[in-house]
Image (spheres, rainbow, N blue to C red):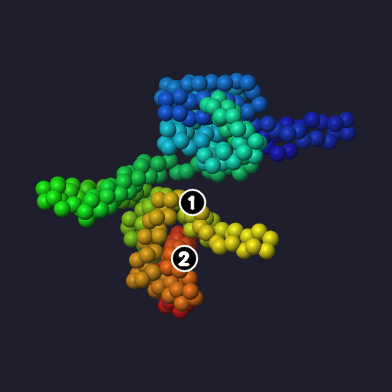
Amino acid sequence: MVEGTKGSHHKEGSTKMRKHTIICAGIDTGKRKLDVAIDGSAARLQVDNTPDGHAKLSAWLRSRGVKRVGIEASGGYEQAVVARLRSDKFVVIVFQPAQVRAYAKFHLQRAKNDKIDAALIAACTAATKKIHAPPDPRLAPLAQHLTMIEQITEDIRRIKTRLEFCTDGRIRRLWEEDLKRLKQWLKSELTALVASIRRHHDLAQRLDLICSVAGVGLRTAVTILVRMPEIGRLSRAQVAALAGLAPYDDDSGEQFGVRHIQGGRERLRHSVYAAALAASFRWNDQLITLYQRLIGAGKPHKVALVACARKLLIFVNTVVERGTPWTKCPAAA
């Protein structure tokens, strides 16, 4: 008998398996409120999206025997309650909004409000077959720190654009002072983030392995480590798909459409693409050869760069999987 299931004995002494029901709940997240529903039950709850509300929610779920909780990613408003429920030993599934919308369309459900969404998420949670392990909790603060660094980089880019079209001397000086300050801030924050990573021996070791790949700088290595914690534990096709660098078919009958990349982790993809842009022209001999071969075959520049970015990420995945640093080899190999 499978662990966690119940059986009924027949007169002959055999055991007949009965379906084991896991009680699942769904949470619709708002900035101030959380609406909760239990799949197959009329029980409903609304609590504040605060620590006190999270404690009340956890106790309410436990009193009703809930084991699995689903919640939709909502721009970060869900992070605190997810952390609380996981610390209370609930299995928590964080859905992408597209997953919940697709489930609603499959069931032809058009009505929408907070209570309906909570019940829909609960049903989606109960229907989920494959549940991934929760991410390393050490990476959450590192991800927030990295997001701040990326936002500083975006501010620097905006100021550079403003300077191109600014002719007033006084305003230019103000922008230049702000630009200098942001660059110093960016450098110090990146140093602090790397120091935080190196406090953990296993993360520091993984960071060094990623940095060893030709064409991957420290900033890109940090992004891969934090934005793709699965690195080294997935296949080459899976890492490409997670980063949004895998070309997908678009065929139907006798029609053969153009392959396009789609989905994936946007910030990670941008970082790997930027690294591949430099590596394909200067730093990585194998990527240089790949880029030249694709261009020689008539592929557009961006198609060749996406292929190089995908190959660069595969190199990183292989190095981390094997646990040995990158070894430079002749491009022909």
Tag 1 near tag 2, CB within 8 Å: no
Q: Secondary structure at mark 2?
A: helix
Q: Quadrant of residue 120?
A: top right
Is 276 situated above or below 225?
Answer: below
Which amino acid does the dot numbered 1 rest on?
A: Gly
The percent coordinates of residue 84 (x first, y second) are 45, 30
Residue at point 43%, 37% (across, down): 75
Say whether residue 237 is left or right of residue 186: right
Is 272 situated above or below 193?
Answer: below
Q: Nearer the viewer, mark 1 or mark 2?
A: 2
Q: Quadrant of the N terminus?
A: top right
Say whether residue 131 is left or right of residue 206: right
Is 284 situated above or below 152?
Answer: below
Q: Earlier in the sequence, mark 1 or mark 2?
A: 1
Residue at point 17%, 48% (across, down): 175
Residue at point 77%, 35% (across, down): 17
The percent coordinates of residue 38 (x first, y second) are 60, 26
Q: Residues within 10 Å of mark 1 (few under 14, many from 20)?
A: some
How far separated are the C-alphas under marks 1 and 2? 17 Å
Residue 117 in view: yes
- Residue behind mark 2: 303
Residue, far left? 170
Q: Quadrant of residue 124?
A: top right
Q: Residues within 10 Å of mark 2 (few under 14, many from 20)?
A: some
Residue at point 43%, 72% (across, down): 291
- Residue behind mark 1: 264
Q: Nearer the viewer, residue 328 or 215?
A: 215
The percent coordinates of residue 331 (x first, y second) are 43, 76
Q: Nearer the viewer, residue 199 or 115?
A: 115
The percent coordinates of residue 251 (x first, y second) are 63, 60
Q: Nearer the viewer, residue 109 or 88?
A: 109
